[in-house]
Amino acid sequence: MVVCWGPVVRVLVLQAAWALGGGQVRYSVPEEAKAGTVVGRLAQDLGLAAGEPEARGLRLVAQGRQASVEVSGASGALVVSSRLDREELCGKSAPCALRLEVLVERPLRVFHVELEVTDINDNAPVFPAARKNLSIAESSLPGSRFPLEGASDADIGANAQLSYTLSPSEHFSLDLQKNEEDGESLLLVVRKPLDRETVPVHRLVLTASDGGRPSLTGTMELVISVLDANDNAPQFTQSVYKVQLPENTERGTLVIRVNATDLDEGTNRNISYSLQHLFSPDGIDVFGIDGTSGEIRLRGDLDFEIVGLYRLQVDAADRGNPPLSGHCKVVVEVLDVNDNAPEVWVTSLSVPVPEDAAVGTVVALLSVSDRDSGANGRVRCAVWPAAPFGLVATFAGSYSLVLREALDRERVSEYEVEVRAEDGGAPPLRASRGVRVPVSDVNDNAPSFAQAVYTVLARENNAAGAELARLWARDPDEAGNGRVSYSVAEGGGGGAAAGGGWRPASSYVSVDAESGRLWALQPLDYEELQVLQFEVRAVDAGEPPLCGNATVQLFVVDENDNAPALLPPAGGGPGPGAAGEAASGPGSGALWAWAAWGAPAGQVVAKIRAVDADSGYNAWLRYELWEPRGKGPFRVGLYSGEVSTARVLEEADGPRQRLVIVVRDHGEPARSATATLSVSLVEGAEAALAAVGSSSSSSSGAGLRPAAGAEGSAAAATNVWLVVAICAVSSLFLLAVVLYGASRWAPRAAVLSGPGPATLVCASEVGSWSYSQRQSRSLCVAEGAGKSDLMVFSPNFPPPPPGPAAKETQPEPPALLDTVSSPPFLVSRPFPRRPFPLLGLLARPLGRCWWEPGSAPGACGRWVLGGCLRMLMGPLHLASRPCRSPPGLALGEE
């Protein structure tokens, strides 16, 4: 395995050089290099792999002027793109270094490259004029010196070092003097005395050669006229004058006043001044001299950034014939003032910036410069506003605009950043550059509802598809991140159906995904569902999506859509109640009850029980007596449904009353149901027996009276009941005869004959019967599941028999107070005392069973039992007449 150490060593050396150079690459290229000339392998020197320069966008950024070089996209080499003229780029400055910035993206990095343009000898020395006329007096002594204007070379260094030669002459020679203050002075020296008559004009060629290889030359013709007789030239007080002027000096300002003297007399002593420029070439247009006074004044504008030093030559010539002249130099130094504001350029801008960009992210690259020098050229930079961006200095005059704080697009979607630059002058000058930085959105906000809980009211029986409410969730993000879709959350709620099951909310309502409108999928029924609670979810379209929830409580408002329904009697026992749904016809909703003749006014006979499936005002029921109209014997409680006597019942009212009762609710419109109540008017004892029979029927499981379909089967058992009844009657008859005889001839017991209020009380599950010699009371309590009512009744006692004993022993009839769970109370009037035949007590019930074969077997037995009881009570004088056989002691249909 062969290891190639050459590239490795080269990379290590390059890295070491890069570290020692402070992270800056330096190249050098001669001026006038051809286009395409490779200056250096920039990508390789920056450590980029092959193909990486083009992929990462390696490019060159020039600062304020054309660099004349470019980066090859394929190879990453720095090549010459156009003509390089060092004199045009840098003038006389040495060295001529161009500062370049190289950018690499992904990630963004900046490298600084310094390109030095080296000088070549491409400029020949140039004299100010191709011909120079000189006048030299013939009286000039050998060694006399006359200044000449030297040539100038645009090159620098050795290429600008000039040497002069003069064409062969025995009278003249050249003298080149050099010093640090005055620079170079070229003088024409007279070697031999001049003789105007021999040679009036000398023509010489002055040649200037530079130090380049090969050397370039320039020539100027010297035409020397020999003048006669004026042998004293003007002389200046100083050979060199130095002046300092601020660059903001106004035109017309006096720069300096020079003075020269001439030892001659007469016209040869009069001096006139003239100004010659040495450096810079345009100095002749900037300064002017008064030929008489020697005052030098400013004609043009000074600019330190263009020319910082002027060297002027002042000639003083007398008016002799020929005139003689003296010379001096004036050096004008231009002082810098703070007249240039800083300049700010944006060299690279990476926008928009994501709002989740990390702190320290580079947003832009800036370049700042000031043409002034010294403190006037030192620039301080700041960014406004101070947050969330900041400036980081990366190189001299280069800054990076970086992120200092986290961004929030929902708070600020775009920043107008101003980069402010201020120099160190007095007063300081300022400049600014605006940078627009938009912030791109990321999905960092979940949708949020205006309310955590929404309360919605919906009427029942609404149409399917009706709009119930409109929900809205706000998402401050933009575009897809802020586009919200709505849905009913699965498993987020539901409602209990009337049958006891649970149904999801999605079976009742739906929400529009885009608008958030809440729709009803089906008509709502208050009796099935009163409250529906569910969650609505709002999800945005971001990646990843974010969501928010809100709870919706849907209350169904009741409508009057249910008519009152009559309830059956509690426990299935006798008493008023509905045999089915009430109807307006006389065969439907039939109810039965009994009332005793002589019952006082206000006596409760029955109670109608009804219920309405609606709620509130729609379920508030009132009861009205529809038939019979007018002043009947009964009335109905408006809100209690209790049927009571309107007056004392009489035999003239007939054996039966048919009442039609209408039950209405308070809804709009009102709904009603009709109940038909048949009230049988019976004797008090028969009513009591009916109560006993009803209680026994209720306890033994007997309910309402058998329907017509069951009467046929019951008629077959009638004969059996008759046989049993005859046997029982015979036995009771014999027992009654024995008891009667015993009562006749046996001594009277104190209980039966004493004057005290002896009372015999017989109790049962359904109530109690009390008998006494002075009063008889019958109480029947029918069981049922109705509401607990407190009812007070006062029995209707007959007037006491005449006689003093009766007045003494008759007590005040006590009030009867009882609390029962269902109506009605049936109270019969006391039985009057009168004798009756014993056989008549059984004839009537037996005859009724015989003549009414369709009667229920239980009814026949009760009739016969009643006759037997009256036989037993007859001998004891507890009753005076037989009771009328009641039509029946149980509720049922006729």
Image (cartoon, rainbow, N blue to C red):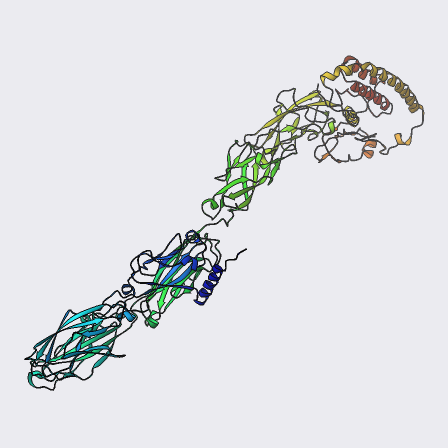
Closer to us: 735 or 745: 735
- In the image, is 112 to the left or to the right of 517? left
Quarter holding residue 393:
bottom left
Determine the residue positioned at 43% across, 67% down: 21
In the picture shown, does residue 628 fall above or below 248? above
Q: Please say whether residue 423 is visible from this viewpoint.
A: yes
Q: Work out whether residue 415 or residue 54 is closer to the camera in this orientation and state it.
A: 54
Task: Measuring from the top left, give residue 364's x and y in whole percent.
Answer: 41, 58
Image position of 441 with respect to 740: above or below: below
Q: Quick check: can you spot residue 435?
A: no
Residue 571, relative to residue 63: is it above or below? above
Query: Horizontally, is 820 left or right of 734 in the view?
Result: left
Residue 62 versus residue 12: which sits nearer the camera?
12
Identify the image quadrant of residue 116.
bottom left
**How many callouts does the rendering have?**
0
Residue 255, given in percent of the width and then of the height, sits at: 20, 77
**Quarter of the image where the C terminus is located:** top right
Q: Nearer the viewer, residue 55 or 580?
A: 55
In which quarter of the view is residue 886 placed?
A: top right
| Residue 423 drawn above or below residue 717 | below
Q: Where's residue 169, x and y in %?
A: 14, 77
Image quadrant holding the N terminus, namely: bottom right
Image position of 337 (left or right of 166): right
Q: Residue furthest left?
A: 197
Q: Tell me residue 181's x, y (percent).
A: 26, 79
